[in-house]
Amino acid sequence: MEAVIYDQHFNSNELYVIVLMTVGFTIYRLLPRTLSPLQTAFTMLISVTSGLIFDHTIAIPPFDLYDIGDNSSYEVFDFISYLMYAPYGYLYIYGFERFRISGIATIGYMLVWAAIALLFEWLGVKSGVYHYKHGYYILYSIPIYLVVLSIQLEAYRAAFSSHRWQKN
């Protein structure tokens, strides 16, 4: 299959990724350290990993619902763009811990973060980062974001729950 070329220049899609990464990592650096270095590394790595897994699951055949970046084949900058997930995954867990979210409030918190992710995706579409195909529509991303946020939170809880380390 021949690659579809959307763009050949450094422009709004690369700039969007750079700005999003810069803003995210700047916010991370300015916040007080609530999470340990291990928790920080874990949340950032799981954010990048889940982004890679879910994007590649639906962005390549057999689904092939959208392309990322300047063309339909992956370029180096496309892989760099996955780093933009790291600070926002950290901020998601940071807020959860900092504000001691629990119970039914967890659902509301996840919905707020799904809305933030949807806003970032919409801006990414407008900037040329994402190119939808085969009738994909932005609202189809909502359940994907909710699954990713749930997995990230449960993985974090499983790894760092205070109950996990207590002897019975």
Image (tube, rainbow, N blue to C red):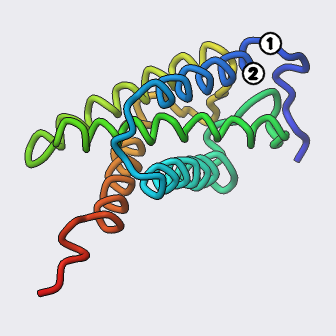
Q: What is the x, y in percent for residue 80?
A: 74, 38
- Which residue type does callout 1 highlight? Asn
Compared to 128, does 145 lie above or below? Answer: below
Residue 109 shown left or right of residue 159 in the figure: left
> In the rendered image, which residue does mark 2 sit on?
14
Indicate left or right for 104 with 79 as reference.
left
Q: Residues within 10 Å of mark 1 (few under 14, many from 20)?
A: few
The amino acid type, in three-letter code, at marker 2 is Glu
Task: Indicate the position of residue 125 as horizontal and vertical percent values.
Answer: 60, 20
Task: Residue at the far bottom: name it.
Answer: 168
| Gap in angstroms between the C-alphas marked 2 and 1 | 6 Å
- As rendered, which of 85 and 135 lies closer to the eye? 85
In the rendered image, which residue does mark 1 sit on?
A: 11
| Quadrant of the image occupied by residue 69 | top right
The residue sitting at 39% across, 53% down in the picture is 152
Left or right: 29, with 11 as reference point = left
Residue drawn at 64 percent across, 39 percent down = 83
Which residue corresponds to the image point at 45% horizontal and 41% vertical from the top-left? 89
- Say which element carries label 2: helix
Whether label 2 touches label 1, CB < 8 Å: yes
Q: Residues within 10 Å of mark 2 (few under 14, many from 20)?
A: many
Quarter holding residue 135: top right
Q: Position of residue 55 (x, y in %)?
A: 59, 46
- Label 1: element kind: loop
Q: Is residue 121 above or below residue 160?
A: above
